[in-house]
Image: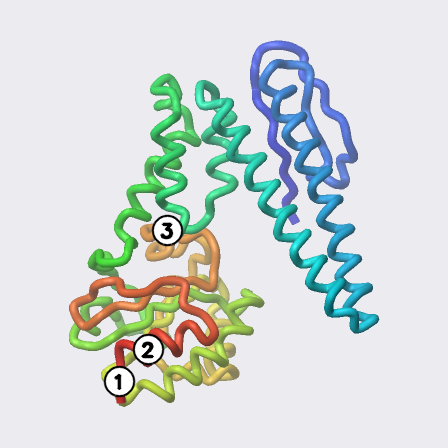
Amino acid sequence: MQQRFSFIAEAGTIDFTGNLEEFDQVHASGTPLNDKLAEYYQQQDELTASRNTIINDFRTAQAAGDTVAMQAALNKFSQAMSKADSLTKVFIGQNTDNVLAPMLALRTYYSDNQYTELDSLYKTFSPTLANTLDYQRIKELLAKWAQLQEGAIAPDFTQTDSAGNPVALHDFRGKYLLVDFWASWCGPCLRENPNIVAAYHKYKDRNFDILGVSLDENREKWLSEIKRGGLTWHQVSDLKGWKNEVSSAYGIRSIPYSLLLDPDGKIIGKHLRGEALHEKLDEVLPE
């Protein structure tokens, strides 16, 4: 398994500390930007340790059946997560004139639901960063995410289905369509699939269909999971994994991911999972 750690290649002597067998614990220092980054990571490490303590407190309370202590732990965990988020935003805001801001922003904002936040941060970056790699990546990502905002027409695409036939998004015009990005190796996807199966059988006779887009690389595993999970709707994949041409064009950085389209191909829902999917379908597909 590949392991990585971040540092800034800048003039001066850069010192590396930590255990090379645990790359997430390796930090660089000795130069201005690396010192800033090391301080940020140290603060985040302290917050992570605090969250781990809270998780242990929750598990202890859960084992004892102490619901009051469980709720208190949940409240503390929420506060700790907010502190970590605030720390990152403040750090980015303090470094908009150097490469640390786009670097941290790109690693923090993973979902198109965060489009507005990332776009706001991006607009604060110094123009002197325009030719840096992470700045350019954010620019490209925002352009992709802009196409996926509710009310927009989902960009068309064509991929090959499990029988080798080309299937296009526009083939489903006239129906409500759930576009579901998933993979056979994705644990959260597999846990969500039974909910999607239930939705399909409940609503398929109400002008509703599903198009699965798999980020698999192994054809046999993809087809096996389709059969095992009862995913009997349309399934496509180019078997390129995270380099899937559709997910790449859409700027998708995590799965499961879904879009709900109306009969005109307009996006009317995103990230619909669990009961939220059924509630939305009940809303747009009355009996």
Q: Are marks 3 and 2 in contact (CB under 8 Å)?
A: no
Query: What residue do we see at 51% from left, 41% from top?
Result: 108
Three-letter code, disc 3: Ser
Which dot marks residue 248? 3
- Work out whether residue 93 or residue 194 is closer to the camera in this orientation and state it: 93
Question: Which residue was labeled with disc 2?
Answer: 281
Q: Is residue 87 above or below residue 129?
A: below
Using a 10 Å C-alpha cutoff, classify the residue at mark 2 as few (fewer than 14 neighbours), some (14 to 19) or many (20 or more).
Answer: many
The type of residue carrying mark 1 is Pro
Q: Secondary structure at mark 3?
A: helix
The structure residue drawn at horizontal position 39% and vertical position 56%, both measured from the top left corner, is: 244
Colour scheme of the rendered structure: rainbow
> How many residues crowd around disc 3 within 10 Å: few (fewer than 14), some, or many (20 or more)?
few
Foreground mark, 1 or 3, reads 1
For the residues labelled 3 and 2, the Cα–Cα distance comes to 27 Å
Q: Whole-Å distance between the Cαs marked 2 and 1?
A: 8 Å
The amino acid type found where label 2 is placed reads: Leu
Callouts 1 and 3 close, C-beta under 8 Å: no
Q: Earlier in the sequence, mark 3 or mark 2?
A: 3
> Which residue extends farthest front?
68
Q: In the rendered image, which residue does mark 1 sit on?
A: 286
- In the image: residue 248, left or right of residue 262: right
